[in-house]
Image (cartoon, grey):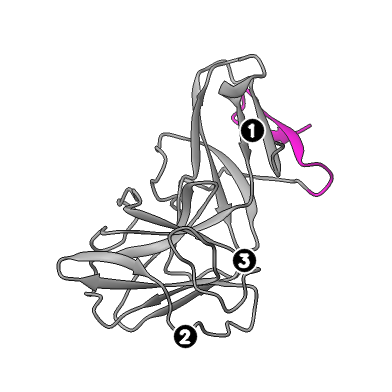
Amino acid sequence: MGFDHTLRLRNESGKTKDFAVFQRHPAVPKDGLALAWFVKTIHDNAKADDSSTFQWNEVYSFVWSQTGKLNEQVRFESSDEWPAAPDAVKTSSTRTKAGDQVNLVKSGNAYTFQEVAKPQDLSTKGLAVLGDKSIVDYEVSAGLAMYGSPFFVVQAEPSWNWVFTPDPQYWIVATTQVQGDAISATGSSNAFKVDFSRSADVTVVYNNKNEFSQQ
């Protein structure tokens, strides 16, 4: 089975570095957080193998976690994951079947996803988390994962509907963060946008001036 995208990184900086791949989507809410989606430690002049290669398919899922108040210091670790598909229009996700929307509710002391009894027409190929009135302010966050790893989350609120329109742009940055950490504005200032428009398999070089370039 092939992959939708393959990113091969050549570290020519002279030092072992950690690198994070993250996503930006033009239409996302400003109060949400992009996460360090995939992180790898790559040695200087490492050979081109799995240790220096990021690969993924554009397969979505809904995620949530009881983070408390969401901020850039939060490390998001998913508590549950349900499959999601933008093309499954006006269809609820279940634990085993992808839809374009899901309910997030609090039952007793625990949060959980539930099926949407009457799926809404989102009027776009979006993905929606529908927040129940049982949600407590500043207690839980929800968002999306791709290929099994969360990449974007927002603070959930009571009686809250969040619609996300997928339009992924892929970026890479040298980092000290781990997977699930928020990518801050300062932390992404030297990030490099990876161009997959000509090929699904690309190589990016990181040089001794701490600069990226695509081959």
Magenta-colored stretch includes residue 139: no
Residue hosting label 2 = 118
Please name whichever residue, 207 or 137, is drawn nearer the observer in this view of the structure. Answer: 137
> Disc 1 designates what residue?
211
Q: In the rendered image, which residue does mark 3 sit on?
A: 26
* Element class at badge 3: loop
What residue is drawn where x is 30% and y is 52%? 74
Q: CA distance from mark 1 to mark 2?
A: 50 Å
Q: Nearer the viewer, mark 3 or mark 2?
A: 2
Could you tell me the amino acid type at mark 2?
Lys
Q: Residue at x 31, y 80 (%)?
A: 132
Span of residues in magenta: 197-215
- The local secondary structure at tag 2 comes to loop
Q: Amino acid at mark 1?
A: Glu
Task: Count how many numbered circles sit on residues in the image.
Answer: 3
**Which marked residue is nearer to the observer: mark 1 or mark 2?**
2
